[in-house]
Image (tube, grey):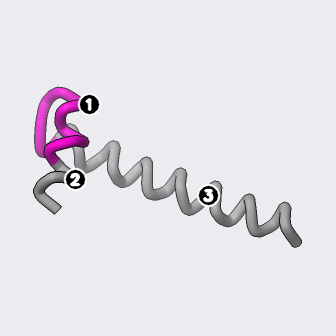
Amino acid sequence: MRRRDFLTTASALSIALALGAQVAPVTKPSRKKGLGDYYRTL
């Protein structure tokens, strides 16, 4: 059961990272700065 929970968490994190990677470049050209600014605007 623990392994399944870990896989679920990992997939959720990867989905969140994928969405963040899609949103960040749209907000700012530079990825590192874009992510920081994106979280600041939240």
Amino acid under disc 3: Ser
- Residue bearing mark 3: 11
Q: In the rendered structure, which segment of residues is drawn in magenta? A: 26-37
* Residue 42 within the segment the image draws in magenta: no
Q: Considering only order in the chain, which callout, 3 or 2, is on the residue closer to the N terminus?
A: 3
Image side of residue 22 versus residue 34, left or right: right
- The percent coordinates of residue 40 (x first, y second) are 15, 52
- The percent coordinates of residue 8 (x first, y second) are 68, 65
Residue at 34%, 43% in the rendered image:
21
Q: Secondary structure at mark 3?
A: helix
- Residue bearing mark 2: 39
Amino acid under disc 2: Tyr
Answer yes or no: do the residues labelled 1 and 3 have beta carbons within 8 Å?
Answer: no
Marks 2 and 3, how far apart at CA: 21 Å
- Residue bearing mark 1: 32
- The percent coordinates of residue 37 (x first, y second) are 14, 44
Amino acid under disc 1: Lys
Q: Considering only order in the chain, which callout, 3 or 1, is on the residue closer to the N terminus?
A: 3
Image side of residue 2 versus residue 15, left or right: right
On the image, which quarter does residue 26 sit in? top left
Marks 1 and 2, how far apart at CA: 11 Å
Q: Secondary structure at mark 1?
A: helix
Q: On screen, 31 above or below 39?
A: above
Q: On screen, 32 above or below 40?
A: above
